[in-house]
Amino acid sequence: MTSQLRVDKIVPVDGVPTSGGGGIVQCVSTTKTDTFTTASTSFVDVTGLSATITPKFSTSKIFVIVTTCGNTNGSKGYGRLMRGSTAIAVGDADGSKGRVTAAAIFQSNSRFCSTLPIIFMDSPGDTNAHTYGLRLRHTSVSTQTLILNQSDDTTNNSTNSSMISSVTAMEVSA
């Protein structure tokens, strides 16, 4: 027979720190290994790259980490961290500038790729299920394409690469 210890919260002997708890309650993660491409200059969901977490406590925060590796055949890519259909952690409105979470100058005509890391602490304030994901857009108005998880050079040889992207969501107790 296997023993099990189940608890909702562990509090240190000296009590919870003044600024809150900070213990990891649960963790979910999704890894995308296939290629995603878009030539859109409007934000589009990256299919297969999202993680859903249901906080156990309404006071918890959700620590989100998104890692991607991408390339273009020229130009830049912008990313938005999403909670459901809502963009979170985006820059302030400033004229006609785009409101994004992160931007990358992806390599052009290269066997390598650039990363677009996003790390954010969200406070949903409830115990509903929340899906965290990524939307991307290309900056060029031409026919250039943003490629996720693959280098721009798609020739099948040992000098080119296939990569992964992931999204991880951790509930952090308050």
Image (spheres, helix red, strand yellow):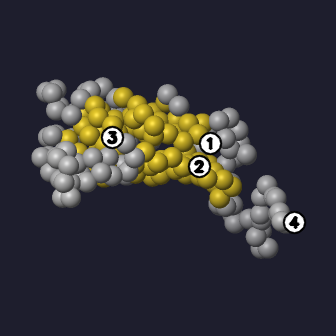
| Displayed quadrant of residue 47 | top left
Residues at discs 1 and 2 in contact (Cβ within 8 Å)? yes
Return the disc, 4 or 3, that comes first in the chain's sequence: 4
* Foreground disc of the pair 1, 4: 4
CA gap, disc 4 and disc 3? 45 Å
What residue is rendered at 43% in x and 45% in y? 32
Q: Residue furthest right?
A: 1
CA gap, disc 1 and disc 3? 25 Å
What residue is rendered at 77% in x and 63% in y? 10
Return the disc, 2 or 3, that comes first in the chain's sequence: 2
CA gap, disc 1 and disc 4? 31 Å
* Front in this rendered view, residue 114 or 147: 147
Quarter of the image that includes the C terminus = bottom right
What residue is rendered at 24% in x and 29% in y? 39
* SS label for mark 1: strand
Q: Which amino acid, mark 3?
A: Thr
CA gap, disc 4 and disc 2? 28 Å
Q: Which amino acid, mark 4?
A: Met
Return the disc, 1 or 4, that comes first in the chain's sequence: 4
Residue that numbered label 3 is attached to = 35
Residue that numbered label 1 is attached to = 53
* SS label for mark 2: strand
Above-or-below relation of 95 to 167: above
Return the disc, 4 or 2, that comes first in the chain's sequence: 4
* Foreground disc of the pair 2, 3: 3
Disc on res. 28: 2
Instruction: List x then y, in percent, for residue 83.
Output: 52, 35
Disc on res. 1: 4
